[in-house]
Amino acid sequence: EERDGFLTSTRHRIEAAVKTNGGFPGIMVAHSMGNVIFRYFLEWLRLEMRKEVLKELMERWERRKERERRQAAVQKQQDTFAGGGVRSDDHQQQKTPGWLGGVFTGIDGLMKTYFEDYLPSSPDGDGSDDHQEKSQEDEESVDAVQIAQIVELSKIEGDQKWLNWLNDHIYTYVGLSAPLLGAVNPLRAVLSGENMGLPMSDDDARTLELSFGSTNNVLPISTKLGFCDATDGLAGTDRTKLACLEELIPEIELAAKKSKQAKPGSSHADPWKQFPALKHLLKERIDWDSNFPMLQASIERCTPSEKADKAKENRPCHNRSAINFSARDAPNGFILSQFARIWKEENEPLLIKRDQLLKSYWYSETAPVGNFLNTTWDRPHIKHVVMSYGVDVPTEVGYVYGKTETIGDEKKEEEHYDEIPKVRSVIWEEEEGKLVEEIKDDGSPKSLTGTITEKIGLRSKKKPTRRVLNGTRPLGRSGDGTIPYLSLSWAHTWLLHATRAMRHSSAEYSEDSSRPDSDGTRITDKHALDEIVVSHRPKGGSEWITGVAPKEKKEDEVCVDGKDGEDLCDTGTAHPHGTKYKPSMIRYQSKGRSRSSGNEYTTAVIEAIGVEHKETTRNYDILAAVFTDVLSNMHDDFPELV
């Protein structure tokens, strides 16, 4: 924004597009990190609106002050010619035209009530000069109070202007493959490099990635920040307009107990049955490190004799330790600091990256939008939101880094630099959420050929060792090959937005017992999950069917590998252009109505089985499903255009 005016030009382009479209709002489509940029844009725009309103209010206030000064000077001159004496009617309040006059009248009333000590005494009509002029000190105190009140007013008016702008300019937000809770792969790219399939070594790729400020935008965000009851005192942002997520759980559980007709296995007996993602996120509170360390630094310290044995027999040394890191350690730069301490690199590139991160998000004077890495993203205030992504593609979700040190090394510490941190093993989530550890480097010394192969960016032909982690399937799904399912599935919490908004009781109605929401309860007898409609589309099908898809029986499939690894189980679902054709899909939909405007809004989440991260931008079936929802909403909202 400082260099190119990117955010400002984005705003102007949207406004121009709406104007040339006859005033009809547009559709914002974002993919991958574009969703993070869109979130940043919305927060930036909100602050811009506040600044614009504040500037307007301050200009009016200055004009009013200047008018009062001129009138006071004229009055003083008239009083001087009249021989002194001030009539009480000369002190009548000056009128300010428009709505701002009422604002300042209200401010004067608040000042008299709460800031009486700051105000000068009223003239008593005795003609004394002491009651005709304010002291400079008193006037400055009154100005400071008024300015503070104007600043608070600008936030209220600015936020309303922001909401009006969104309603007028963005009709639908389509988020494809959105990393709502970030990803772990950017950490790997920074710590050890990731060539992403390009013909370069990971070391060279790391040099580039260390200079990219954008990698900080998608660092992992802990799910704990989406709740209000974090035990470590690090709960997320104050959601004054929404009920906390954890407040919805008791009523969901209670609904199942109250249902006398509940049958074992029915949705009434288990209200979470059709909503596994919400169950994992809300009830089980799954986080990045719930089943394994998101990131681990394993340190092995060997004596010279142990090092010789390790070279011969790959025998581990006795002095070993490990440091585990969670998602809470990524946004604040703690991981970068600790890795810089363990791996002493020349010029300390990880500390430079840490300082870049802190400057962008944590230092208030250089982070005008604030730190959104320290909170989860709630559903934006846009009429229709559609989130879509692929699932059940093997995705990296954790890493183990290893370092071997020699005890008693004669090299002076200040003259010795370590190599770039190396990944020893990768944790993958695979189809249906199965966790697998892939051991890439067991710590044994590499041959000269192996070292050269790694340096020039070629992959070793030796298959890494793989093992299943205790048969765990914590989420029941895997991500899209780039973004873990935990991050993608946070969109399911947006389906609860209407319920959370209805449950929250506004302070202005808290004393009105006649209102159904005066005690903080929702204005409905249904629990949160009852408001969500679930449907699915079978593999190869074209129509949506109500309810979740029946569990497929893998054992009924008889698959034979053809020549060159051809998958004979694929019955025509591979599109000739490289994308999945008619994949099985599941869709979640919810509706709500704004209590302030009465306008209806919708939220949809679409999951496509087996569709990879980049495919979502060109997969016909995903785009057709998304824009079928968009066209259906347009049909309902703009019947005059149909």
Image (spheres, helix red, strand yellow):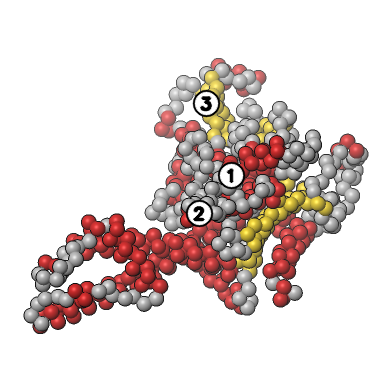
The circle drawn on residue 405 is 3
- Farthest-out residue, left: 83
Q: Which residue is mark 2?
A: 512
Farthest residue toward the front? 514
Q: Amino acid at mark 2?
A: Asp
The quadrant where residue 22 appears: bottom right
Q: Secondary structure at mark 3?
A: strand
Residue 399 at least partly seen? no
Q: Earlier in the sequence, mark 3 or mark 2?
A: 3
Q: Residue 582 at x, y = what percent?
A: 83, 54
Mark 1 → mark 2, Cα distance in angstroms: 25 Å
* Quadrant in the picture for residue 17: bottom right
Spot occupied by residue 591 in the image (x, y as percentages of width and height): 67, 57
Q: Which mark is residue 456?
A: none
Mark 3 and mark 1 lie on one chain; the one further toward the N terminus is 1
Dot 1 or dot 2, earlier in sequence? 1
- Classify mark 1: residues with Cα within 10 Å, few (<14), some (14-19) or many (20+): some
Give 390 or 593, whichever is nearer the viewer: 593
- Identify whether 435 is placed above or below 154: above
Q: Amino acid at mark 3?
A: Glu
* Residue 278 appears in the rendering: yes
User: Could you give the CA–CA distance between mark 3 and mark 2, rounded to whole angstroms?
Assistant: 69 Å
Name the residue at 63% across, 66% down: 171
**Label 1 belongs to which residue?**
245
Residue 565: name its quadrant.
top right
Q: Nearer the viewer, residue 11 or 158?
A: 158
- Is 402 displayed left or right of 102 in the figure? right
Looking at the image, do the residues carrying marks 1 and 2 touch, with CB atoms under 8 Å apart? no
Give the foreground label among 3 and 2. Answer: 2
